[in-house]
Image (tube, rainbow, N blue to C red):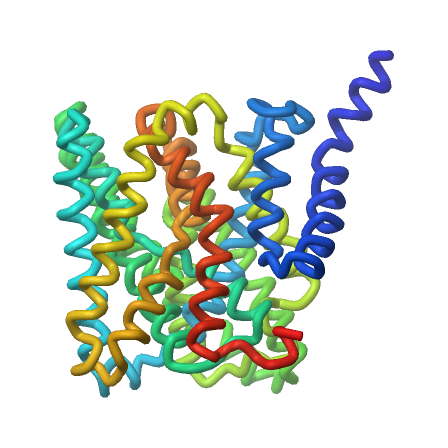
Amino acid sequence: MIYLTNLATEMAWPITIILAWIIGELAHRWLKLPHISVYAIVGFALAPSQLGLLPQPSSYSMLILANMALGLILFESGYRINLRWLKTNPWIGVTSITETALTFGAIYFLVREFHVSLALALLLAALAMATSPATILCVINEQRSAGQVTERTLHLSVLNCVLAVFIFKIIVGLMILKTSGNIWHATYTSLTTFFISVLLGAIFGLIVPAFLRIIRSTHRDSTLALALAVIFLVLLTHTLKQSPILASLTFGLVARQRHIVLSSSQRGFGVLGSLLAMILFVFVATTLDWHRVIAGIGLGLAIIMIRYLAKIIGISCFSYVSGITHRQGFLIATAMTPISAFVILVLEQSRYLGINLVEQLAPLAAIALIIEVLGPVLTRLALLWAHEISDKEDL
């Protein structure tokens, strides 16, 4: 009996991943749901606080696998950022700063009305600024989407991600300073971590392309080498207690500028990327507790609506001057709904660093669950309404 119990525990994650894949394929074929939405539903349903099939998701190994998956996706997100486009059309950067500032202000004042403490209100506002490039890129790759709405959504989501991490680190540093009075510890946890992570990503972005040129790598070899480099970078930054998110984004951004080719046939890093992405979205959902979802549902829904309105207003303000219509601006704001994968892993990484914010931010559980399921659906619909999804996908 003990043997069977141990076997069930050890096989829980493999069984869950297989179930997520099977149900995801069926739901995608019959209901046209994005795979990652279904992965989230399966992960949440089988989580320890729900049906209890899975063990506690806070294990180091699962967190590392999730970070590897996020690292690969964020590398590709950074790789697809066109700095020349941002320089030619600075209104895109202005749009990002405006809509994130509006989101931060609106969410801060909203949660303060719910009598949330100052520190937690600032943290919620900072996390609400973000958009999850991982979710958006998975939908884009799955739907083979291309066009103005697609590219602007991806570019704005990456800019949001960087701004949100920067502000989040500053606020956490201020919290540590207020609690401990240790200026060095507070600074290292905030700004120093930010810049070290970016520096590590930039170093990898210079060294790896140089090595590939020396060995005259083919496109396929380049993709494999880049995947190995991203995984190593994630492990390195995690061990050093830096930010894998910023390091991976920077690596992808610098690698593009060094003219390294990521073959279109290997977008998403092939089968390895697909498997790790599945693990990522299942894992993210397993961290959510049903009780916290219920406890934070009211404020969570309010944050979702205010965040959506702030993004619509912020993006629409600069639609025409940046070269798009108001309708396209609305669709971009809709496509930027996803947030969960980014927020959950930021909080899990903070807990690994000894800063437990998950228990204190109950509304995020409700936000994460709702957007983890609906976010990819809304992104797909926005790209479909923008007529940027290939005809083959719609059949």
| Horizontal relation, residue 174 to residue 68: left or right | left
| Horizontal relation, residue 378 to residue 26: left or right | left
Residue 65's spot in the image, x, y percent? 59, 46
Residue 392's spot in the image, x, y percent? 65, 79
Q: Nearer the viewer, residue 325 or 289?
A: 325
| Horizontal relation, residue 172 to residue 368: left or right | left
Residue 22's spot in the image, x, y percent? 75, 50
Q: Is residue 364 above or below residue 168?
A: above
| Horizontal relation, residue 41 to residue 340: left or right | right
Residue 356's spot in the image, x, y percent? 35, 27
The quarter in which the N terminus is drawn is top right
Q: Is residue 303 above or below residue 316?
A: above
Residue 53 visible: yes
Quadrant in the rendering for residue 84 = bottom left
Quadrant in the rendering for residue 97 = bottom left
- The tally of labels here is 0
Q: Is residue 248 above or below residue 318?
A: above
Residue under the image location 22 percent in, 35 percent down: 185
Q: Is residue 130 above or below residue 60?
A: below
Residue under the image location 12 percent in, 39 percent down: 109
Q: Nearer the viewer, residue 161 or 206?
A: 161
Residue 184 visible: no
The quarter in which the C terminus is drawn is bottom right
Residue under the image location 50 percent in, 57 percent down: 377
Residue farthest top in this picture = 1
Residue under the image location 68 percent in, 53 percent down: 27
Q: Nearer the viewer, residue 286 or 226?
A: 286
